Structure formats: structure tokens, C-alpha cells
Amino acid sequence: MRNPLTRERREEEEQEKAKGLGVPGPRSQEVLRRKAQVVAPAVTSLAPFVIAESRGAVVRDLDGNEYLDFTGGWGCLVVGHTHPKVVHAIQTQAERFVHTDCSVIFYEPYVALAEKLVQYAPGERPKRVAFFNSGAEAVENAVKIARYHTRRRAVVVFEGAFHGRTLLTMTMTHKAQPYKAHFGPFAPDVYRLPFPNPYRNPMRFADWERRFKTLLDPEEVAAVVVEPVQGEGGFVVPTEEFLPELREFCSRHGIVLVADEVQTGVGRTGTFFAVEQFGVEPDLICVGKSLASGLPLSGVVGVADVIDSVPDSAIGGTYVGNPVACAAGLAVIDVLEEQGLLERARQLGERLEARFLELKRRYALVGDVRGLGAMRAIELVRDRETKDPAPEETAQIIKGALARGVILAKAGLHGNVIRMLIPLVIADEELERGLDALEAALAEVARG
């Protein structure tokens, strides 16, 4: 067993990380020194500085250095950092009341936000909404709803999936390090099947169905949980026909189809929900992250005859659907509508795709370019024929971009994907400046 880091060693690692990325700010380093003494060492940050304030796509640290944030708080900031309308909504609601627990006294912001989500949910069947705190809670409650509705136990998930870090959602998540190693035993009745990845595994649905039926009886399956575009798995868009055929398969066998849109939802892909672009109506949709601009809020949007089957108080929690978070969520949707950010996501996606295809043409490290709307990524490989992943080179590129003032995030089972989670309000000049920094870092690594 690995010995826990000593306080002194944690402090040294924080300082070395900062020096290695060219961020010597004394104020940030002082806070990080304090952090090493009192915060669990598992709690680390991508950027080795401490934030002072942020606006739109720009972050400023305690020492006055500015950075472009292409991570959007891990996808929580489609309307950008501290959007004025969201801030005003938070302040206004906080002055009225901050908390009641909706199971004690109900409040109008919960209802109003549910109405908005029902309006955006795809399909003609009536919908209902239940709110929670985190994406993992939404997924876990979707599974509970599916199991109660079907009176079945089995749950099917996919290779490359990420659904959270609670016991059940950690089980559903694929990647072992750092999410699962030594945290077992895991929840029972969770089964994993391949995800049809056009770059690495473009399997036909008939082959997928055959694999399914050799693994378990469809009549014992409560839910299939799928990300319309895999997030942590590497921004993988499935083959075009997969989700429609999966919908038909689930309907045929009485299986609840759950779309995990925690990262894809709220406009990032150019439609409010990504499944809209596949012509699919799931039975349950999980939403979170950008829903309340980073405030703890998630939800399950469900077809009425599925979600209504759950009895009184069977789902819920003390803080679920917090009124301040719901007010922020209403403001986020207002901003999406007023600023035309769904169309902006499509435009950003076109620009990102064009730039990334040019990178692929110029640099052999870029093996694949993919995504939907503004949710775009490049996969880095050492050899285009073997598709051998290039995680070390990916880490070097992210480090080089950060030294140039741009915060990037990686993804993928092998950590060899660079993903874009940019705020949709980003200025064109900021986008180009950030992509220039990415290319400069990529070129530097490509030269060896």
C-alpha cells in the first residue's frame, strides 16, 4: 500500500507543479502552501494557481495573471463565468429565501424551471421533472426510477462511460484510474457493453445486440444508460444509426432508455439536448453541470408514465432543487434564448472542426477529429496506423498551452484526447487566441 504523502511532500509537489508551468505567483503559491497542510491530497487542481475572479471565458488569478478557460468548469459554464443575468438572479433569490427543502415548503422557481425543461425535452409524450444536486445523483435516481417502474434489476452501460463517483455511478463508470481502483466491492447487476466508436470500433447494431443477448436476458434489464456523446470517455459520437436502433430495441423489450446528458445538455451540442440530433426520445434524461451555471443542481426529465410510477417520497433529498440554484437555472435558459446560444454552439462547432481538421492535416499526432456542436475534441496518437494512444504527448500539450495562458482539459480512457468545453459566450478573438496557443503547444511537442 502506498504511504500517504507527508505534508512537506504535498507542499513540494504543489510548488513543483506551479514552477513547471511557469506560474510563480506568490499569492497563489501561498494559498497552495496552506492547502497542502489542511486539504486532502486527493483534492488537486488542473491549474496551479488560485482564482481571484472571472468573466465570460477569462479567469484572473490572485497575482493578476489572466487565462482563457477552455474547460468551462468541467462543462458547467455554457453561459460563461459570472454572467450578469445569472448573478442577478442568484442575488435576488437569495434575498427572498435560500432554503426550505421542497418536501417541507414548495416554491415557484422549482416549478418554473421544470416547465422550461419539459418544453425543451424531445418527443410528444408528457414529461415530468425531479431535481437533485449533482450529475451522479441524477443518474442514480434515474436508475432507481427505471428499476421501480420495470421491477427489474439489471442496468446496462458502455465502455468509455462516465456517470459519476457514488457507489452505483462509480460502478457504471468505466475508467479504473483514478475513479474505481481500490474502491470496491461495486454495486451488483451492472453490465458493460462496447460503445460504437467510429474511430476505434465502428460496430453494427446487430453485432451489439448479439453481444447484449449473450451477456443477459433483455427481459431482466431495467435500464440502458447511454451518453449521446461520451464526455470523459473522449467526446465520442456514436455511429449515426446506433441511438435510433437502441431506442427501438429498448422499446421492444420494455427497457427504460436513459440518456445521460449531464455534460452534453443545456445547449453545448447545438440543441438543448444532444439526443434531439439523433431523432430519439429517451424515457429519462439526466441533466446537470451547465443547468445552473455551476451551482449544485441536476435533474431527471422523465416520460410521465415512467417517472410517475415512483411513490411519494421515494426520491428526493434535503437540498435537491435548491431555490437559488433553480433561479440560476432559469437565468441560464433565458441567456441561451436571448443570446441565440444554440446557434452560437453550432457556429463554434464549425470553426473548431475546421481548425482541428487543419491540425490533423499538419500534425501526424492528431489521429481523429470529432464532436457535435461546440463539444469538439482531437485524439492524439503516436501512430495513425496502429492508433497507439499518446497520453504523455497530450499532457505536454496541455502543459504548453497553460504556459501560454490557456486552460485545456483532457479526456479518454487513455488520457489522449483534448476536449473543448468552452463557454458559448466566448469572443471570436478569444477563441482564435486560445486555438493559436493550442497549436503552438502541439507544434512544439510534434517537433520533439
Image: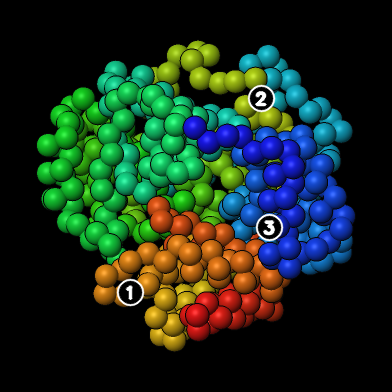
- Residue 49 higher or lower than 98, as above or below: below
The residue that mark 2 highlights is 319
Locate residue 219 relative to residue 235 in the image: left or right.
left
**Lower sequence index among marks 3 and 1:** 3
Residue shown at 69% from the left, 74% from the top: 404
The amino acid at mark 3 is Lys
**Quarter-wise, where is residue 434 in the image?**
bottom right
SS label for mark 3: helix
Secondary structure beneath dot 2 equals: loop
Left or right, 28 with respect to 328, comes to right
Q: Is residue 257 left or right of residue 295?
A: left
Q: Compare residues 36 and 201 and report the one nearer the observer.
A: 36
Q: Is residue 367 left or right of residue 442?
A: left
Question: How far across and how far down the image is residue 204, in percent?
Answer: 17, 56
Q: Are marks 3 and 1 in contact (CB under 8 Å)?
A: no
Which residue is disc 3 drawn over?
Answer: 17
Near-viewer residue (386 or 316): 386
**Badge 1: how crowded within 10 Å, few (<14), some, or many (20+)?**
some
Residue at 56%, 42% (x, y): give it: 288
The residue that appears at 59% across and 45% down in the rendered structure is 289
Q: Which residue is mark 1?
A: 383
Q: Quadrant of residue 342?
A: bottom right
Q: CA distance from mark 3 to mark 1?
A: 29 Å
Residue 49 pos. (x, y %): 76, 56
The amino acid beneath tag 2 is Tyr
Q: CA distance from mark 3 to mark 2?
A: 36 Å
Of tags 3 and 1, the one toward the viewer is: 3
Instruction: Tell me which amino acid carries mark 1.
Output: Asp
Near mark 3 (Cα within 10 A), the count class, few <14, some 14-19 or many ≥20, is some
